[in-house]
Image (spheres, rainbow, N blue to C red):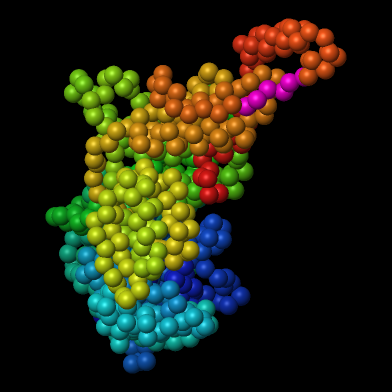
Amino acid sequence: MDTIRNFSIIAHIDHGKSTLADRLIQKCGVIDERDFQNQILDTMDIERERGITIKSQTIRLPYKAKNGRSYVLNLIDTPGHADFTYEVSRALASCEGVLLVIDASQGVEAQTLANLYLAMEHDLAIIPVINKIDLPSADIERVKGQIDKDLGLDPDTAVCISAKEGTNIEEVLDAIATLLPPPKGDPDAPLKALIFDSHYDAFRGTVVHFRVFDGSIRAGDRIQFMSNGARYKIEEAGYFQIRQVPCAALSAGDVGYMLAGIKTVSDTRCGDTITGAEKPCETALPGFREAKPVVFSSIYPVASDDYEDLAEALDKLKLNDASLTYEKDSSAALGFGFRCGFLGLLHLEVVQERLEREYDLSLILTAPSVRYKVYLTDGDMLVIDNPALYPDPAQIKTTEEPYIKATIIAPDRYMGAVMKLCLDRRGINKGYQYLTSERMEMVFELPLAEVIYDFYDRLKSVTQGYGSFDYEIIDYRQGDLVKVDILINGDRVDALSQLVHRERARERSLHACERLQEEIPRQMFKIAIQGAIGGQIIARTTINAFRKDVTAKCYGGDISRKRKLLEKQKKGKKRMKLVGNVEIPQSAFLAVLKTDTD
């Protein structure tokens, strides 16, 4: 155990985490140069294109240090976005130390701080790594000052590297071997192991990623998951070196995988404890909780014939993404679909892109919503995430909505713009502090519903890309919630209904009406597009009719002749409106979701 080092790399988005992992893998010679590709631990196309890690990976690196000793370095990679904070926390619980990567030109940002606090909660050793020193805008001394003042870490231990150029990678490996502590544990105690991830193999079932804290695990052992009591017999155990390498046994301190004929990923919950079926450990490892979706949206196929394909695609995607939840849903306007729950807006975008690319589907998503608590006059409490299930307002006593604590770091010259943005979104300012002479941290409490719409894009706009944002859900608070319906030619379109705060109802419904006015084609009769709360119309736009000039044949004469022809035309239009049917194009549903800044 003295030669094992379990570590993770944490960073703000785009500070070079995946590139550093690539260089460490190359330096340790785990993979041939001809098989190597950039972002080797990022296996999805979306991860490569966006430069973010969505699904964490693990790899075992053999390393011979300068002191002549051989070490086993287990890199447990983590996702890099606020939506996946729970997965990051479980990966960190499996480590003894972390590399905290900071961009030499950008400096400390919101997720750098959030990830540092997560690492401190788990009492991990922290090695600061200053990356991108090859950039012309790199300011190493300024970043060292931030490490000292903002993070409270020793700047002298910071390793200055360029992951892209491969500069000083040897020093990083040496720091991992010498500065990080070895794992603790008793190889002879009953088995206690932490699941920090899992993925689905079409041929072999679920592959469980875990870290052993006590005892040992080998093929043939019978094990039990402590959260649900499920029991399995291990078919194979081993470790990751890009590929899965079977081994005789994994004991305390080791990180690896196991196969046990588990049919679905949802049976293996992230953060669960594995123990022996015959000789279980006394207590489970702390920190386990079930991943709860916070953002909800309905997914419908553009062509109703694709419904079966969508159902099959979601089944397959669920095998690899245990945090995705879905149930059957239907809409009068869009037909049959599924109501899905996501960890956040990025998770929603990733699922949508994967369904469209990997399964070749064309989809429509309804406006994202959060989970509201509705207290009824008869004492019942409903949890609602779908506008279609919203009860009659006469039966509602109070409604509550989820709030988040948002931490925003930005240069102080953008303070006014950030304040205005947050206060416009019903935010409560909880204070601010200067991290350096020019950068400040602002803390706000905001309704989650105001953040999921377009908050992140607006923040990037008002801070010219320098603002960074991290959040955590804190509690539910009372709010004045209303259901906004969109009526087209007097008919309610259920797929366009939204649950919003009363203050934002007029603004949201007017935005939807204006977008629909642009998208719905003109007819031979006038079309009214209205936003309504119950029977009260709060917004309206009109699509004018095509009109033939019926008075063109009247030259001179009495005005009553022209008026008679216009009245006749008006009656015809009215009759046409009663029997006319307005077809809503698919693009109209997507247009409503877009913000004014798009």
Q: Main secondary structure of the magenta part?
A: loop
Horizontal placement of 98 versus 545: left or right? left
Residue 156, picture quadrant? bottom left
Residue 435, picture quadrant? bottom left
The answer to whether any part of residue 431 appears in the image is yes
The answer to whether any part of residue 470 appears in the image is no
Taking the magenta stretch, the answer to whether it contains residue 545 is: yes
Say which residue appears at 35% left-offset and 36% top-offset: 503
Residue 368, picture quadrant? top left
Relative to residue 503, is residue 378 depicted above or below?
above
Horizontal placement of 14 versus 84: left or right? right
The image shows a total of numbered marks equal to 0
Where's the N terminus, which quadrant?
bottom left
Say which residue appears at 51% left-offset and 64% top-offset: 51
Q: Residue furthest bottom?
A: 67
Relative to residue 310, is residue 23 depicted above or below?
below
Horizontal placement of 476 versus 324: left or right? left
Instruction: Please provide percent x and percent y for residue 272.
Output: 27, 52
Instruction: Please provide percent x and percent y for residue 34.
Output: 61, 75
Instruction: Please provide percent x and percent y for residue 507.
Output: 44, 37
Taking the magenta stretch, the answer to whether it contains residue 466 is: no
Q: Residue furthest left?
A: 282
Relative to residue 106, is residue 54 depicted above or below?
above
Instruction: Please provide percent x and percent y for residue 510.
Output: 49, 34
Between 256 and 334, the residue placed more toward the observer is 334
Segment tinted magenta in the rendering: 543-548
